[in-house]
Amino acid sequence: MDRSLGESREAVHAWLQQRIPGADVLGHAVAAVAKLFSADGIVTTDSGDFAAWVDRIFCFQRSARLLGSACGAMGSGVPSALSAGLRYPDRQVIAFCGDGGFLMIGNELATAVARRLNIKIVISNNQSYGTIRSHQERAFPKRLWGTDLSNPDFAALARAFGAQGYTITNAAQAAEVVAEAISANGPVVIELRSDVRQTIDRSLVAAPG
């Protein structure tokens, strides 16, 4: 019974990965990370539309762990990764964040560097509070307000802290850059230059109504 359930889950996740739009940087990068995810790895997620790709693609073994915010609070991805890295220094720890959430508490990279934590932080940089923007687009079309962000170069920011920084600007780069970044030692930031207009199926991320 367990075997057939496991095979069914793998088939579903494989099918979902095949449906990633060709130009979607975020979807392809998350898929590349998932392929290199350890059986006992730990994933932390901040809050935002980007997390829908993590929920859709990742297939967790029983020995893996997922740390997220049940209340949808932003800014939890990096601190959760720090906690996991300190508690389990020998396990793979990957944090997924949006640009807005990372900007709230990304200065904790200093702690990751000081403690030499082997954590990887994936940032979806779409220069927007994407979830809030999507609500505005549904309720008040063409009346967006206060959701645009003026972001730094996150990879350069990581290097300024003493971490390693990588940037992915198109889907074709995802697999190669992710493989290099995941294999690097110490804290790493992977910046994904994503497009706020590119989303997965609206039915999977949009609220009813």
Image (cartoon, grey):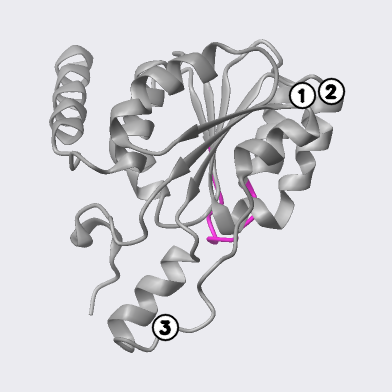
- Crowding at dot 3, Cα within 10 Å, few <14 / some 14-19 / many 20+, comes out as some
Let me know if residue 173 appears in the view. Answer: yes
SS of the residue at dot 1?
helix
Q: Secondary structure at mark 3?
A: loop
The residue range painted magenta reads 67-76
- Answer whether labels 3 and 1 touch (C-beta < 8 Å): no
The residue to which callout 2 is attached is: 115
- Magenta segment includes 164: no
User: Residue sitting at 24 percent across and 52 percent down?
Assistant: 200
Circle 3 is placed at which residue position? 144
Mark 1 or mark 3, which is nearer the start of the sequence? 1
Residue 8: x and y, percent?
Answer: 14, 24
Residue drawn at (37%, 76%), measured in percent from left and top?
135
Q: Amino acid at mark 1?
A: Leu
Mark 1 / mark 2, whichever is N-terminal: 1
On the image, the x and y values in percent for residue 169 come to 40, 39
Cα gap from disc 3 to disc 2, whole angstroms: 41 Å
User: Is 123 left, or right, of 110 in this rendering?
Assistant: left
